[in-house]
Amino acid sequence: MQSPVLGTSVLVIGTESLLAERAVNQWVGAARREVPHAEMVEVEAVELEGNRLTELTGGSLFATATVAVIRDLGNLPPELHDALVAVAAQPGPDLCLVLVHAGGNRAKSLVDKLRKAGIERVDANPIRAWEVPGFVLQEARHQRLQLDQQAAQALVDAVGSDLRSVVSAIQQLRSDAAGQPITAAFVTRYFAGRAEVTSFAVTDELLLQHRDAALEKLRWALATGVAPVLVTSAVGASLRALGKYHDVRASRLSDNELAREIDVPYWKIKDLAKQSRLWTPAAVARAIQRVARADAEVKGAATDPDFALELLVLDLIAIGGAP
C-alpha cells in the first residue's frame, strides 16, 4: 500500500471475497485515518450512468476529501471505461479511488487499460487447498493466537478450507483458549464433539439428498453455536466445487489432477463423484443462486437466520431432486 493513500487509486481484483473485502477495508481505513472527516461513497459500477462518475469522484462541497469505492467493476458501462481510467490515473490529491473487480474476463479491456495506466493492483485470488494451513498460521498470528503447523492442519481438517469458516474457527479458538498455545490435540478435542455438526457436515448430508439428516444436523449445529453464515459459506463452497467437477470430469485426468484443477483435497474427489450423480449442472447453478439469497438473509435481510437456513435446506433438496 502506498503512503499516503489520498491522491491514489487501487484495483482490488480476484474471486476470493474475504481477501478482497479485507483489501478494500485496508485502503478505506488508511484514507480515513489520514483524513477522518473524508466523505465515504460506495457504489456499484452498473449504477454509474450519466454524470454519476463525475459526481462520485469530483469531491463534495461539504468534504475536503473523498474515499470512493466502486464495486463489481465488470459491470461498468463500456462508454465509461475511458473516463474511469482517466480519473484513476490522475485522481487528484483529495481522492482515494478503490476499484473492485471479481476477476474473470468481464471488462478485461478495462482491467488492461488500468494496468497500462500504472494503477496499483491488489490480487484477491483464491488460496489453494494445500496453502490454507499457511493462511491459518498467518491469521492466528494476526489474532495473537499461538498455534503451530500441526494445529493449523488439524483445524483445516476439522472445518474445511473455506476461508471464512477458517477465520471464524480461529476466532472461536482464541476466545476459548484463554491465552494458552493451541496444539493439534487441543484442536482435535475442541472440534471432536462437534464433528457431526460442523457446517461442512450439514453440507455433506444436503448434497447427498439426505433431507432429515441435513435438517437434524443443521438444528444441532445452530444450537451448539455454529454461526449461520458459516453454513451458507460451506454450502456455497461445496456447490462451486461440484460445479467445477461437472465441468472437468469428462477429461482424462487422474484424481490427483482433478483435485488440483478443482482446488480441493485429493480425498474430496470421491465425494464429488458421488454427489455429481445426484445433481445436474443446471441444478447446481440454481442451487448456487439460492444460496446467495440465503447468505444475504442470514447477514441481515431476514429476521430469523435459523429459519432462513431451514428453508434453504428444503429448497436445495427440492432443486437437487428436480429432473
Image (cartoon, helix red, strand yellow):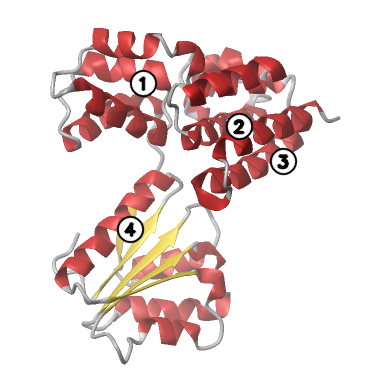
- Which residue occupies the foreground of this view, 211 or 270? 211
Q: How many marks?
A: 4
Mark found first going from the N terminus, 1 or 4:
4
Residue 24's label in the rendered image is 4
Residue tagged 2 = 239
Amino acid carrying mark 2 in the image: Leu
Name the residue tied to disc 3: 286
Q: CA distance from mark 2 to mark 3?
A: 10 Å
The residue that disc 1 covers is 156
Instruction: State the image coordinates of residue 303 (x, y, percent, origin top left).
Output: 57, 47
Decide: few, some or many residues near mark 2? Use Cα within 10 Å; few <14, some 14-19, many ≥20: many
Give the residue type that dot 4 points to: Val
Sequence-earlier tag: 4 or 2: 4
Where's residue 191, x and y in %? 37, 14
Q: Earlier in the sequence, mark 2 or mark 3?
A: 2
- In the rendered structure, which disc, 3 or 4, sits on the residue that comes first in sequence? 4
Instruction: Mark 2 or mark 1: name the one nearer the start of the chain.
Output: 1
Residue occupying the point 27% across, 20% down: 152
Evaluate if marks 1 and 3 touch, with contact meaning CB atoms under 8 Å apart: no
Residue lying furthest right? 323
Q: Can residue 243 be seen?
A: yes
Q: Is residue 2 left or right of residue 10?
A: left
Residue 123 pos. (x, y %): 34, 51
The span from disc 1 to disc 4 (Cα, nearest Å) is 26 Å
Q: Amino acid at mark 1?
A: Val
Name the image quarter holding the N terminus: bottom left
Inter-mark Cα distance, 1 to 3: 28 Å
Residue 113, image quadrant: bottom left
Q: Is residue 270 above or below residue 37?
A: above
Task: Please name the amino acid that badge 3 sits on.
Answer: Arg
At mark 2, the secondary structure is helix
